[in-house]
Image (cartoon, rainbow, N blue to C red):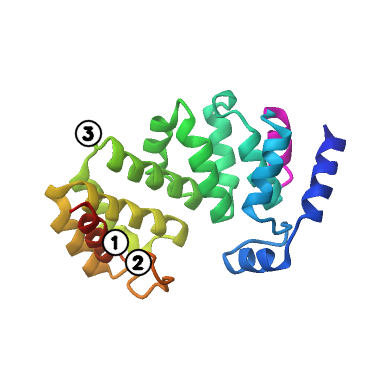
Amino acid sequence: MEQRVEEILDRLKSLGDSKVRERNAKAGAGENQFGLRMGDIRKLAKELKTDHNLGLALWQTGNIDARYLAILLMKPKELSAAQVEEMMAQADFTGVADWFISYVIKKHPDREALRQKWMEDDNPWTARAGWSLTAARVEKEPQGLDIPGLLERIEAEMNEAPEQVRWTMNFCLAGIGINLEEYRQRALSIGESLGAYRDYPVPKGCTSPFAPEWIREMVGRRG
């Protein structure tokens, strides 16, 4: 396995791009990266096919590109809840963290128990996952969630939260305003008061992450 991992790392290195490395660095990535384009990672994953043990070994390298690849090779249901929690806490780059949430945690049978636990966690990466999973529930399965309590927490905590957490708390706020009409005005009011991401640079044609603008845009699209 060790030799195979080294061979794959060599291949990843050969596909690296300096512009991607620079972009990753600006987003908070450390030096343990090659800077692959997402398309190249997906192409390699398709070639290698699902290989859980190889995925685990690649994850342990700590290399960002190897971890992206690992996420696509692993079988979420073969990970214990403890493994998922440990790996989420190690996902120290936002891109890797969000891929891990989307491709592993959201498919894991213990995702709801982990969500509840992580909503009270001090680790910024697991807390990011907790809020991301909560935002997903707001959109698809809000029954049973304490929406007023979530809004109170967002209002009280979001602007002081670590950026890793602040971003997904904001997703949750916007999701409440977009999907739950009875709480829309409250979400808009909190968003205006907090002002989070009000001046965030947005490419032409994209939706602002400033929650009030985001909410109004998405509600408007739904007519």
Q: Are marks 2 and 1 in contact (CB under 8 Å)?
A: yes
Q: In the rendered structure, which disc, 2 or 3, sits on the residue that comes first in sequence?
A: 3
- Residue in the picture at 58% in, 48% down: 91
Q: CA distance from mark 3 to mark 1?
A: 23 Å
Q: Amino acid at mark 2?
A: Ser
- Tell me where residue 188 sits by quadrant: bottom left
SS assignment at label 3: loop
Left of 90 or right of it: where is 152?
Answer: left
- Give the residue pinned by disc 1: 214
Q: Amino acid at mark 1?
A: Trp
- Residue in the picture at 68% in, 43% down: 43
- Give the residue pinned by disc 2: 208
Q: CA distance from mark 2 to mark 1?
A: 6 Å
- Residue in the picture at 36% in, 75% down: 199
* Dot label at residue 113: none
Residue farthest along the right direction in this orientation? 3
